[in-house]
Image (cartoon, helix red, strand yellow):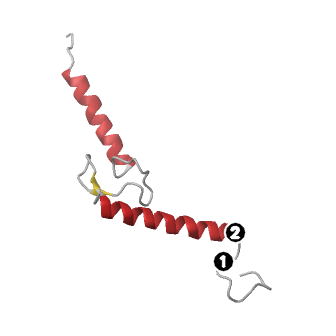
Amino acid sequence: MPGGVAPRRRFCSPACVARAYRARQRQHNVVTLLRTVGGVTCPGCGWAIYPGGRYLRSDARYCSPTCRKRAWRARRRAAHDGGDHDG
């Protein structure tokens, strides 16, 4: 804490207040999502994911960029192998 502030003060600056608020909101959103949805399964690996939780967008379908890329490559390979080839 900076010197000369009230002893009951919890945060050192408005930026710290905002960061704590955002952390509380994220936690609240995750808890609400878990109560309503119960999580989603990653189509790539089958792990349970919680969109809107830590490091994931609220519309996330995959648990990680690795699973997303793996699924894209599998779709691309399936489309390529399913087409007609000359030769």
Q: Amino acid at mark 2?
A: Pro
| Image x and y of residue 17, in percent | 64, 70
> Please, which residue is most extreme toward the bottom here?
7
Dot 1: within a 10 Å radius of its alpha carbon, few (fewer than 14), some, or many (20 or more) residues?
few
Pick the front one: 37 or 49? 37
Q: How many marks?
A: 2
Distance between the alpha carbons at the discs numbered 2 and 1: 8 Å
Q: Which residue appears at 26% of the width and 30% of the height?
A: 77
Decide: is 10 above or below 21. Answer: below
Q: Give the side of residue 85 with respect to residue 36, left or right.
A: left
Dot 2 alpha-carbon crowd within 10 angstroms: few under 14, some 14 to 19, many 20 or more: few
The disc at residue 14 is: 2
Establish if 85 lies above or below 42. Answer: above
Task: Give, as a three-letter code, the residue at label 1.
Answer: Phe
Q: Residue at x 21, y 10 (%)?
A: 86
Q: Which mark is residue 11?
A: 1
For residue 73, the mark is none
Element under label 2? helix
Q: Are marks 2 and 1 in contact (CB under 8 Å)?
A: yes
Q: Quadrant of the N terminus?
A: bottom right
> 16 or 79: which is nearer to us?
16
